[in-house]
Image: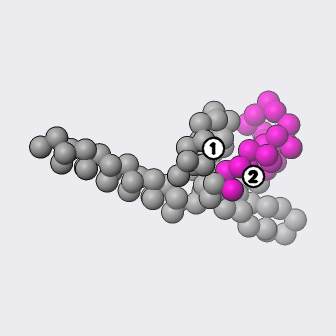
Amino acid sequence: MFDVYKVIADETRRKILDLLKEKDMTVSEISGYFKISQPSISQHLALLKNANLIDSFKEGKYVIYSLNLTVFQEILGWVFNFANTKEEDEK
């Protein structure tokens, strides 16, 4: 879990996740939303991928990036479980 929190602490990576929430995209498409180089975007994508927050697949000569919703579901499950445990402890 720590890696996920560390990775999403960066504003650029959170913006990339927001973009991928709307649709799957290539690095070139994602780069169009930022004033930083495509190699920098690729580094952010690599960190997101290493944290299992995004997936990628090859389509022809392009690599397409998409959200890995499973990890977000796990995080939400943990947060809800944590909140419910805290509420139970207060009763």
Name the residue located 68 percent from the left edge and 36 percent from the top edge.
12
- Residue 1: x and y, percent? 53, 52
From this viewpoint, which residue is outermost toward the left?
Answer: 91
- Residue 91: x and y, percent? 12, 43
Magenta-drawn stretch contains 79: no
Q: How far is disc 2 from disc 1 in space, using C-alphas?
A: 10 Å
Q: Which residues are magenta?
A: 27-50
Magenta-drawn stretch contains 34: yes
Give the class, few, some or many, for how many residues have Cα within 10 Å of label 1's Cα (few <14, many ≥20).
some
Q: Amino acid at mark 1?
A: Val
From this viewpoint, which residue is outermost toward the top?
Answer: 35
From this viewpoint, which residue is outermost toward the front?
Answer: 89
Q: Amino acid at mark 2?
A: Ala
Q: Is residue 9 above or below residue 27?
A: above
- Label placed on residue 46: 2
| Element class at badge 1 | helix
Most common SS among magenta residues = helix
- Label placed on residue 7: 1
The reply to whether residue 61 is in sight is yes
